[in-house]
Image: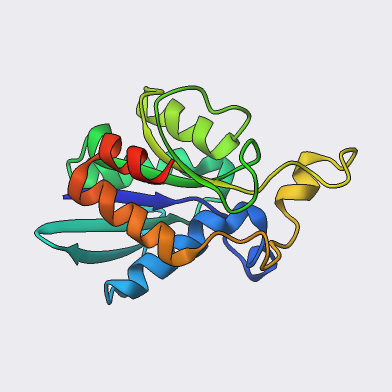
Amino acid sequence: MKLIVGLGNIGKQYDGTRHNVGFEVLDHFVEEYDGTWSEESKRHARIALVQVGKERIVCAKPTTYMNRSGAAVQAIASFYKLDSNDLLIVHDEMDLEPGRIQFKQGGQAAGHNGVSDIQRALGTTDLQRLRIGIGHPIPPEMRAEEWVLGPLSPDQAPNALDIVAAMRDWIEEGLESAANRWN
C-alpha cells in the first residue's frame, strides 16, 4: 500500500489557483483509476482508495489548509501503518518553470509551508515529492502569497495525463526510475 498526498487549500475560492495544483492533479489521478472521494474527518482529509496494478493506493487531500497539512498526513500514515518510503507528496513549486514536473527525494522545504509542516509532523525531511512548477511571480515585485493564490492559466498548467503517468511510474517502478524518466 502507498499514500499519495496532494497539497492545496479547501474552499471554492482556492479552486484553480497555483497553490492547489496538488489537489487538481490528484483529482485527475483518482478519476483515471475510478476512485471516489470520501470525507474522513478523523484523518483531516478527503480520501480515495484506488488500485494501480497490484498496488492499493490511498489518495489524500488534507482538509486542514496547506500550512497545517502535517496533522493530516501523520494521521493517515499512522492509520494505514505506512512509513515515509510509501509516501509521495504532490505540490506546487515556484522554483520550477510553469508546467514542469520533477521528482525529489529529501531536502528542505524551500519556503513551502505545507511541505515544511509535513516534515515537522513526520520528523523527517527525507520525503519523496513530486514538484509541479508554477514559476516565480510576474511581475517580480508581486508577493509570493499573491502569486500562489492567483489563478493558474491553461498555458501554465501541467499536463494532467503526464502527471498521472508519472505517479503510476512512481508506484510501479519507484522514485529513481520515475525521476529518470520524468525529471
Is 64 positioned to the left or the right of 76 in the image?
right
Quarter holding the C terminus is: top left
Q: Residue at x 26, y 56 (%)?
A: 58
Q: Residue at x 34, y 68 (%)?
A: 30
What percent of the width, then of the height, locates residue 96? Answer: 61, 40
In front of the other: 38 or 101: 101
Is 57 positioned to the left or the right of 16 in the image?
left
What percent of the width, then of the height, locates residue 34? Answer: 27, 77
In front of the other: 146 or 76: 146
In front of the other: 117 or 95: 95
Q: Residue at x 65, y 40 (%)?
A: 94
Where 20 sits versus 51, above or below?
Answer: above
Query: Would residue 37 be visible to someone looking at this image?
Result: no
| Extreme residue toward the left, this view | 54
Q: How is the image coloured?
A: rainbow
The number of numbered discs placed on residues in the rendered structure image is: 0
What percent of the width, then of the height, locates residue 138? Answer: 84, 47
Q: Residue at x 50, y 54 (%)?
A: 22
Residue 14, quarter of the rendered image = bottom right
In front of the other: 170 or 91: 170
| Extreme residue toward the front, this view | 181
Where 32 sits versus 137, above or below?
Answer: below
Residue 36, quarter of the rendered image = bottom left
Is 33 positioned to the left or the right of 45 in the image?
left
Query: Would residue 53 be visible to someone looking at this image?
Result: yes
What percent of the width, then of the height, locates residue 133? Answer: 59, 46
